[in-house]
């Protein structure tokens, strides 16, 4: 009986702290999808990340400033990737074509093998490993790796 209670509490915590439990139908003005969760990083440079439901997976949208390096500081970077979330709460997202405010990436830019962003989701934030995407699609000195703290409380 005690094991069932522990399992029930565990499932409740996963549903509360896991963005996969959020509504897939959230839309904003003009029918655009609103992020399910937003995150921010301060070091080594300011960056933000948002997660949106997309089909059975997640769209990861990243914007990061260049790592401070005086006149050699890289321009801001923008990446988007789409992929599923596994049982360990890791989103395995492949960089996807998009048109953004800071960057535009086409299918031809990506080529046959898209870099993979790994986004480990936790109750206080996400940890990102970019798989070489920033080095490939952003200015030299760009960095999107690291911990991003959650800005909103999960429902």
Image (spheres, rainbow, N blue to C red):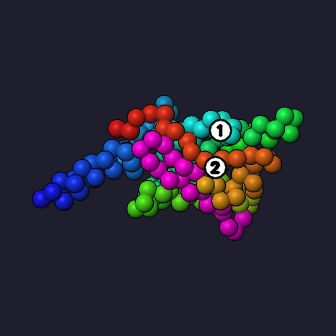
Residue 119 magenta-highlighted:
yes
Camera-nearest label, 1 or 2 = 1
Quadrant assignment for the N terminus:
bottom left
- For this orientation, the residue located farthest to the right is 71
Q: Which residue is mark 2?
A: 145
- For this orientation, the residue located farthest to the top is 29
Q: Residue at x 65, y 59 (%)?
A: 131
State the mark number for residue 43.
Answer: 1
Quadrant assignment for the C terminus:
top left
Q: CA distance from mark 1 to mark 2?
A: 10 Å
Q: Is residue 4 above or below residue 63?
A: below
> Within 10 Å of the Cα at label 1, are there few (<14), some (14-19), or many (20+) other Cα atoms?
some
User: Judging from the image, what secondary structure is the residue with disc 2 in?
Assistant: loop
Q: Residue at x 24, y 50 (%)?
A: 9
Q: Position of residue 20 (x, y in %)?
A: 39, 50
Q: Which one is earlier in the sequence, the residue at label 1 or at label 2?
A: 1
- For this orientation, the residue located farthest to the left is 1
Splitting the image into 4 quarters, where does residue 42 fall? top right
Q: Is residue 60 above or below residue 29?
A: below
Q: Residue at x 18, y 53 (%)?
A: 5
Magenta range: 111-128
Is 25 situated left or right of 79 in this image?
A: left
Q: Position of residue 113 (x, y in %)?
A: 68, 67
- CB contact under 8 Å: marks 1 and 2: no
């Amino acid at each position: 009986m005690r094991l069932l209670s522990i399992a029930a509490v565990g499932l409740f915590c996963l549903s509360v702290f896991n963005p996969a439990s959020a509504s897939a139908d959230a839309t904003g003005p003009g029918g655009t999808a609103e992020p399910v969760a937003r995150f921010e990083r301060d070091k080594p440079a300011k960056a933000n990340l948002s997660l949106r439901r997309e089909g059975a997976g997640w769209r990861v949208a990243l914007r990061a400033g260049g790592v401070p390096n005086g006149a050699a500081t890289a321009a801001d970077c923008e990446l988007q990737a789409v992929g599923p979330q596994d049982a360990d709460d890791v989103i395995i997202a492949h960089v996807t074509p998009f048109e953004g405010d800071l960057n535009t990436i086409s299918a031809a830019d990506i080529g046959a093998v898209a870099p993979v962003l790994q986004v480990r989701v936790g109750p206080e934030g996400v940890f990102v490993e970019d798989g070489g995407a920033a080095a490939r699609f952003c200015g030299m000195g760009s960095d999107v790796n690291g911990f991003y703290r959650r800005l909103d409380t999960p429902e």
